[in-house]
Amino acid sequence: MNGYDMAMAPLETWILRHIRAEIIPLARGDVLEAGMGTGVNVAYYDHSRVRSLTGIDLECPPVLQRRAAKVFTLVRGSVEALPFAAHSFDSVVATLLFCTVNAARGLREIQRVLKPGGTFVFMEHVRPEGPLAAKAAEAVNRVWSRIANGCNLTRRTDDIFRQSGFADITVKRSGGVFRYGHATKREAG
């Protein structure tokens, strides 16, 4: 287990694994996972519904390369400029990604590579709802962002998703700061 996975282990145990178990199996067909990180989602896919799995990440750490071996295709790159043709994927998965990237640009790219009627599956953390928790997040955000690879604790990613042009957006809440769900790319025409 690498350092990131160890640091995330309590959250995985208490919250994230339950969310992953609910949403990741929604991916089907040709799947792109944007911001694959350490590859923790791989165990949650329903591989009987996935024809191909392509992962993209900026860093492709050794733990991800080991998990990729014979299971999926791994590409180095960013969700902000996906190196794939339009309408390439039936599903796109992104978990804990949009706190560190330009969300509007990334969502445009996801819409571009999704086939009409395709599914976008997501899980993110957002600005805490309560006023005290929100103030605490704002107070530590600048320092946290520096030590956590640009992670932004105060972004309202769920609002950005709702305004992105996807159809049938389902957003659920968990643990006060996590939002997860799925959306559908509008059919052409």
Image: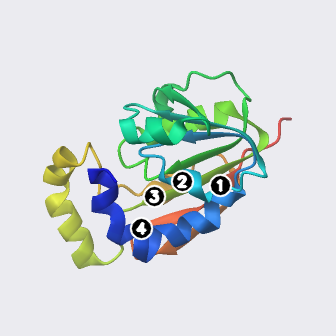
Viewer-proximal residue, 173 or 6?
Answer: 6
Label 1: state its secondary structure: loop
Circles 1 and 2, Cβ within 8 Å, touching? The answer is yes
Query: Residue at label 1?
Result: 45
The relative height of residue 131 versus residue 79 in the rendered view (above or below) is below
Label 2: state its secondary structure: helix
Residue neighbourhood size for the residue with mark 1, other residues' Cα within 10 Å, grouped as few (<14), some (14–19), many (≥20): some
Query: Residue at label 4?
Result: 12
Residue type at mark 3: give it.
Glu
Whichever of labels 2 and 3 marks the residue nearer the N terminus, that label is 2
Q: Is residue 121 left or right of residue 67?
A: right
Residue type at mark 2: give it.
Asn
Residue at (31%, 78%) from the top-left corner? 130
Query: Residue at label 2?
Result: 41
Residue neighbourhood size for the residue with mark 3, other residues' Cα within 10 Å, grouped as few (<14), some (14–19), many (≥20): many
Residue at (50%, 42%) from the top-left corner? 67
- Which percent across, then down, holds residue 52? 71, 37
Nearer the viewer's eye, disc 2 or disc 3? 2
Viewer-proximal residue, 43 or 12?
Answer: 43
> What's the mark number on residue 124?
3
Q: Is residue 74 left or right of residue 23?
A: left
- Which percent across, then down, holds residue 101? 39, 39
Circles 4 and 2, Cβ within 8 Å, touching? The answer is no
Q: Quadrant of the C terminus?
A: top right
Question: Which residue is farthest right?
Answer: 189
Residue 103, image quadrant: top left
Circles 4 and 1, Cβ within 8 Å, touching? The answer is no
Residue at (36%, 36%) from the top-left corner? 61
Q: CA gap, disc 4 to disc 3?
A: 13 Å
